[in-house]
Amino acid sequence: MLVMAMSIGKSQSYDEELRVRKIREGTVIDHITAGSALTVLRILGISGKEGNVISIVMNVPSKKLGKKDIVKIEGRELNSKEVAMIALIAPRATINIIRNYKVVHKERVRLPPEIRDIIRCINPNCITNSEREPVQPLFKVLSDNPLKLRCQYCSIILTQEDVERQLG
Ligand code: CTP
Ligand code: ZN
């Protein structure tokens, strides 16, 4: 085992296969910002109680990102709408749909033009934070990467850091 561990690094695919094998059917979310896999699952509302096999790999070497996380969800095909919100914390993530061991669809995650849930406005005086008659938050996505969201009510700009503080 130690010998294998020492010899990996030469072949990245071999390296990855040692950690988590290929799946037969389901969804692979790849190129997740290193360290964010658990937040991705939380955003997707996946707790593990659903019963399907879920594999999480964190901080593995990546040519494009230096380090990345990967989440593999077996027996379930997530669509681009379902995964869109993970772009909030993993803007370079790709969603791969796997059927019979083959990648049949690959797509980069993309935020919708507007975000209505998940995020709260950081301005305590914003109408969306009022205790008496709170209004549902609504943000316009100005930019994906680096993340910039503008509150439609008070116009304050939320950055990646603001969003990570809430979701991470
Ligand atoms: N994958 C998997 N099971 C399969 C097929 C692919 O778990 N049956 C995983 C791979 O390990 C990889 C991701 O799905 O993490 C995408 O697979 P693939 O497109 O073959 O890899 P790359 O070409 O490296 O992807 P990219 O170009 O997006 O980096
Ligand atoms: Zn606001």
Image (cartoon, rainbow, N blue to C red):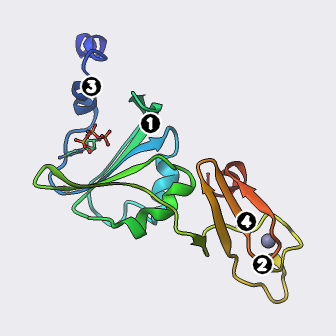
Name the residue carrying label 4.
Answer: 150
Counting residues from the start of the chain, the first of labels 3 and 2 encountered is 3
- Total numbered labels placed on residues in the image: 4
**Residue 155 location (% of width, % of height):** 80, 69
Q: CA distance from mark 1 to mark 3?
A: 14 Å
First along the sequence among labels 2 and 1: 1
Residue closest to the far front: 142
Q: Is residue 105 above or below residue 117?
A: above
- CB at disc 1 and ligand 1 closer than 8 Å: no
Contact (Cβ within 8 Å) of mark 4 with mark 2:
no
128 on left or right of 18: right
What is the x, y in percent for residue 20? 26, 38
Ligand 1 lies under 8 Å from the Cβ of mark 3: no
Residue 68 has which mark? Answer: 1
Q: Which mark is residue 15?
A: 3
The answer for how far apart the CA atoms under marks 3 and 2 are is 47 Å
Identified at 21% across, 26% down, the residue is: 14
Q: Which residue is mark 2?
A: 128
Residue type, numbered disc 2: Thr
The residue that appears at 40% across and 30% down in the rendered structure is 60
